[in-house]
Image (cartoon, rainbow, N blue to C red):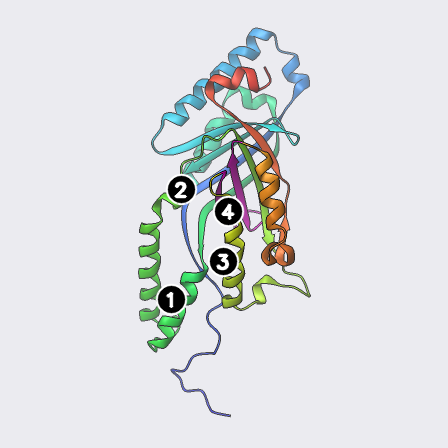
Amino acid sequence: MSEQTPNSHPATLPAVPLTIEGAWVLHLMYRLNRSRWNGLDNLSRRDMLREFAADLRYAQSLETGQTAAYALVGKGDLMIIFFRESLAALQEAQRDFLRSPLAGYLTPVADYTSVVELGLYESSVKTFRALEEKGLERNSEAWQAAIQETLDRQAEAMAPRLYPRIPESLYVCFYPMDRLRGEAKNWYTVPIEERARMMHEHGLVGRRYAGTVKQIITGSIGLDDWEWGVDLFAEDPVVFKKLIYEMRFDEVSAVYAKFGKFYVGVLCKPEDVVEKLFG
């Protein structure tokens, strides 16, 4: 058996794929406290909704972030999605909403904190191989500098995807998910080249729906209870079922995916608030 020299590298590439991050995202889900709400007179309820509509219109006019409201179907009454440039800005958005009169009549159902994430599986494999071929010591200053150069280049090229606009589609579907860490099947023990292959095939399914659904993936490892959040936006909610059902048959989802609760809602513009939200 040949002895490894100090500059030789393991046969396998680094396990962790490169990622680039963008906008910070917060989902807040609420159910109306109907006993308290129904105790108000009609004028008070309408004034409260109009104030919420004005706040929503103002938030949507700001250039420093994005806000969208949805009337939920099934697991609550209201979901608000905030896109901001920092975690601190998310906290401010949450604080400001909780100060509104309407918030006092809402009961939290769920919330989710994450950051827009683009996983660079294919780029990671190519980059790691190129650096190994150059003889760079893994995690050395030269290695880290080359990695950072790759990340900066990718971030600049993908800026619109890192800081996307919240689509104005009529319907939304949000759900969190994990990759399996079971005894028999464990995503995190699979070599990166194999994971890159599976993710490429997984992505091909989504691309077939590019004209009918818009997808925003957010990372939440270390930020919330699941590992990723997925937002789907479409004009026809049936496409959510078709896309997710088809994806269940590819290897990534069939073998390694775990899903949390699904939240489905209807876009609520400021002018729709009184009609769609508790009207």
Residue 205 percent location from the top left of the image? 53, 50
N-terminal of the pair, mark 3 or mark 4, is 3
Range of magenta residues: 212-235
**Label 1 neighbour load within 10 Å: few <14, some 14-19, many 20+:** some
Q: Which amino acid does label 2 sit on?
A: Ser
Q: Distance between the residues labelled 2 and 4?
A: 32 Å
N-terminal of the pair, mark 1 or mark 4, is 1
What residue do we see at 32% from left, 51% from top? Answer: 157
Q: In which quarter of the image is the C terminus?
A: top right
Q: Which amino acid does label 3 sit on?
A: His
Q: Which label was assigned to residue 208?
A: 4
Labels 1 and 2 touching (C-beta < 8 A):
no
Q: Which label was assigned to residue 127?
A: 1
Residue 67 percent location from the top left of the image? 44, 30
Residue 63 percent location from the top left of the image? 34, 31
Nearer the observer, disc 1 or disc 2? 1
Instruction: Say above or below: 55 vs 165.
Output: above
**Label 4 neighbour load within 10 Å: few <14, some 14-19, many 20+:** few
- Residue 219 appears in the rendering: no
Q: Which label was assigned to residue 200?
A: 3
Q: Nearer the viewer, residue 166 or 205?
A: 205
**Label 3 neighbour load within 10 Å: few <14, some 14-19, many 20+:** some
Query: Which residue lies under the disc numbered 2?
Result: 86
Q: How far apart are marks 3 and 1 (CA)?
A: 17 Å
Taking the magenta stretch, the answer to whether it contains residue 176 is no
